[in-house]
Amino acid sequence: MCQVDEDYREPLQRAEEVPRKCVKCKEGTAAVVIRAGDAFCRGCFKEYFIHKFRAVLGKHRVLFPGEKVLLAVSGGPSSCSMLSQVQEGLSQNAHKKLRFSPGIVFIDEGGAVGQSAEDRRRTAAELRAVFKATGFPFLMVPLEQVLDLPSSVVAAAPAPLERSAGAYKAAVGHFVQSDGVGRRTPLEREETAPAAVQESSTASLQQLIGSAKTLTAREDLLNTLRQHLLVHTARTEGYSKVMLGDNCTRLAVKLLTGISLGRGAQLAQDTGFSDSRYGDIVSVRPMRDYSAKEIAYYNRVFGVPSVFIPSLDTKTTDKSSIQRLTESFVTRLQADFPSTVSTIYRTSEKLQTCKSSSTADHCDRCLLCMCALDTAVENASAFQATLISEQLSQTKAPGATSAAVPRPDLAPMEPESTAAPGQCCSSGGAEDCGKAASGAGCCSSAKGPEGTDLRSLLCYSCQLTIRDMSSVERLPHYILSEAQRRQRRSQMREEIGEFLLDEGDEGD
């Protein structure tokens, strides 16, 4: 029988007092315990870490020899560890050298998170010292430049022809025979000083981020703008691949966050190894097999430098945003159940992008995230039910007051014509549309609507982000101009639709 005053607890031996041997070499004393039963000595842990990085690149065979790859380094532990692995793979002592030509880019988001100019300069100086030590060419781009991007950023460029497995082997053989002559040498060009950031640009960026009412929407909007600037930088600098530092823990959080934000149709692209939504620029995630714990141990043991940079959710509570709440949930669950992150991660590996999503026309893609639109669904669907509920909730009841339900300010994307009555909109040019004098109205007012609803150009998740914004007028000009172009193209297609041949009529 159990007694109330009995003590069944035995004195536990402290884990650090238990002598353990390396599970690989069976000789060295364990210096790192990644998980239960996986204890490595210092040398074996370094071999294990490097092999995992090479293995994921060799498995997918996306990076061809001599290809220019842009490393997106934020200064955090994961991206700095990725930079260290690339530097290790290109060193003279590497067993199997990497065959691509790397470059580094750092997106300075200090203006968006409210950092002072002095703090931004200090952070840039610390990162510049880290980048110069690698010998790779690097760029430091302020996020304020996203306000001046061309509209081609949100238009998918033609993707290069898909290469076969034999083409990769042939490229490797050619690269080995040429002894890497075509590879870009370190510091081939001098570092260009970052452009001076105007205070007005910083204020405009802060107003754009601040127009989102919730922290969830602000983080999602900031991530979209960062991705646009990375793609534009890669295109202008001649890079065909962008290497991101997302680790396994971060991708597990992103998976659950994406489901909560309605991005279920885009999870394969958001969490997969490669992301080709922009066509000519492909994003890869070689750190996706590493947990945050492994990266922290490696950086600590081998002295990999990193720089702490505050973000939007720094010093916020767990319930301040969906992203922050999901991260807290996953990390706390991982502490008690060590297989949590790996289970979520293995689930993301099984996700695939449907063929229609990868081959969709650029007009059938979301204006912000550039993924295939997921709003073209049947009437009997959860999305349509959500829209009907929203419309009913905004409908006034009989006898209700004139107080309207607050709605997002979907301001007109196209300014109203300033031409006087009876005057053509093109009166400043050499041609006249001929309709102003007849009183039928200007041609521009007849062709295009005075306002554009951005919702028809966005996926469901981006619609939620725009809905949380106080005004869409603060969006960058390249997004608004592309929205106008897509609306005009869609209207033109409707006007000439009866004269177009269907796909089934082309063979008749």
Image: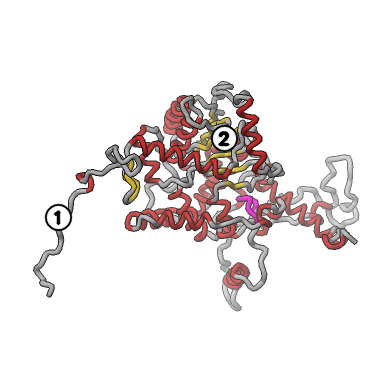
Q: Is residue 147 above or below residue 339?
A: above
Which stretch did the figure color magenta? 366-372
For mark 2, what is the residue?
70
Q: Residue at x 61, y 55 (%)?
A: 353
Task: Describe the element under mark 1 as helix, strand or loop.
Answer: loop
Residue 58, how many percent across, how many down? 54, 41
Are the residues at dot 1 and dot 2 in contact (C-beta closer than 8 Å)? Answer: no
Residue 127: in sight, yes or no? yes
Real-space CA distance between mark 1 and mark 2, rounded to the nearest whole angstrom:
54 Å
Q: Is residue 299 above or below residue 347?
A: above
Q: Measured from the top left, where is residue 355 in percent x and y? A: 67, 56
The reply to whether residue 67 is in sight is: no
- At label 1, which amino acid type do we have? Pro
Front of the two marks 1 and 2: 1
Assign the N terminus to one quadrant of the image: bottom left
- The residue sitting at 64% across, 58% down in the picture is 354
In what element is the residue under mark 2?
strand
Q: Which mark is residue 11?
A: 1
The kind of residue on which mark 2 rests is Leu
